[in-house]
Image (tube, rainbow, N blue to C red):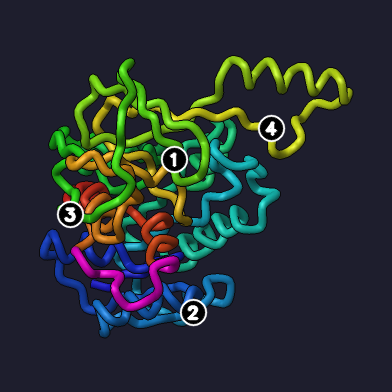
Amino acid sequence: MNILSLFDGMSCGQIALNKLGIKYDNYYSSEIDQHAIKVTQANYPDTIQVGDVTELKGEDLPQIDLLYGGSPCQGFSIAGKQLNFNDPRSKLFFEFVRMLEETKPKYFLLENVKMQKKWVDLISSYLGVEPIEINSELLSAQHRRRLYWTNIPRVEVPQNKNIEIGDILEDNVGGTKVEFDENGICKLVAMNKKNIILEAKYQPPYTIYETRTEEGKRARRELRKLLGRDTTPRGINHKEYRINTKNKCNCLVTVKSELDCIVDKEYNYRFLTITEMERLQNVPDGYTNYVSESQRRKMLGNGWTVDVIAHIFSYMK
């Protein structure tokens, strides 16, 4: 069995295959990030690195049985600028299509973010299949909605394992102690100097999500009128942070962010540790421990939720 992984990153697909006990003869990884390659080779030294996908040709490879990849999503993300195929990173999707045509694998899988329907339909037209949406929160303590296009037959949404934040936290990490006033509202100012609205009735652990105040919305509208422009100048945010009552972590991002902050069981307000991030992606503890913390955060934010991929692969004959 020969496997080709495009945009392989730190090889989350390979973790999924090994979790399932699926044996393979050759694992070809197309990746250009040297930090991600270092982590992959440290954990799976037999991985065959084949370099930049734009220079890869199907004729140079043996028969591929399984082709998969998560082409860069920045141009599609609803949270981003949504440049779509005008973004050079999102154009790499067509390299996936080219390799699919050149290798003609038995099975394929493409992962990407939630996006506008017109882009979903366009990708589906190229791949010949409709995507299945799976939220990682079913198999992890992380809220992460993703689309998966695959010809693996009869894949269904997995059962909810009901994993919560408290199940993945490390103990005695430290942080800023949360204190409440007589009204049960948090008195402290957050790490980023913006107000945190925490109500004492919610028992930790829990995560924080950001919202915009009505006051902020009015201020931005008035400022746009005054300046005669459609967009708001930078720095006019008026953000607050509130409790995520679903007891799930926010979707991991690639840099240290207030969205990666939690209030843990000891009432400490703090960032998620790298080990906790690995657990949110179903990656073994210490798997990324070969590069700097910033690079570890980046590849975990860009990575796959391993158990979701393992669930999809489990439908292969």
Q: Percent position (x, y) of residue 100? A: 46, 60
- Per the model, the C-alpha gap separating discs 3 and 2 is 42 Å
Image mark for residue 51: 2
* Residue occupying image coordinates x 58% and y 71%: 54
Could you say whether the residue bearing mark 2 is in a helix, strand or loop? loop
Q: Which residues are magenta?
A: 285-295
Identify which amino acid the numbered label 3 is placed on.
Answer: Asn
What residue type is disc 2 on?
Answer: Gly
Whether 83 is among the magenta residues is no
Residues marked 4 and 2 touching at CB (< 8 Å):
no
Identify residue for label 4.
236
Q: Disc 3 or disc 4, which is closer to the eye?
A: 3
> In front: 32, or 298?
298
Cα gap from disc 3 to disc 4, whole angstroms: 37 Å
* Number of residues whose C-alpha sits closer than 10 Å to that of mark 4, classed few (under 14), some (14–19) or many (20 or more): few
87 vs 108, left or right, is right
Q: Residue at x 22, y 37 (%)?
A: 205
Residue farthest left in this picture: 21
Quarter of the image where the C terminus is located: bottom left
Identify the mark at residue 172; answer none if there is no mark: 3
Residue pictured at 59% horizontal, 53% vertical: 90
Q: Is residue 46 left or right of residue 160?
A: right
174 or 232: nearer the viewer? 174
User: Residue tagged by mark 1?
Assistant: 190
Give the left or right position of residue 260, taking residue 34 as reference.
left
| x then y, percent, for residue 31 | 46, 73
Mark 2 neighbour class, 10 Å CA radius: few under 14, some 14 to 19, many 20 or more = some
Please provide percent x and percent y for residue 97. Answer: 52, 57
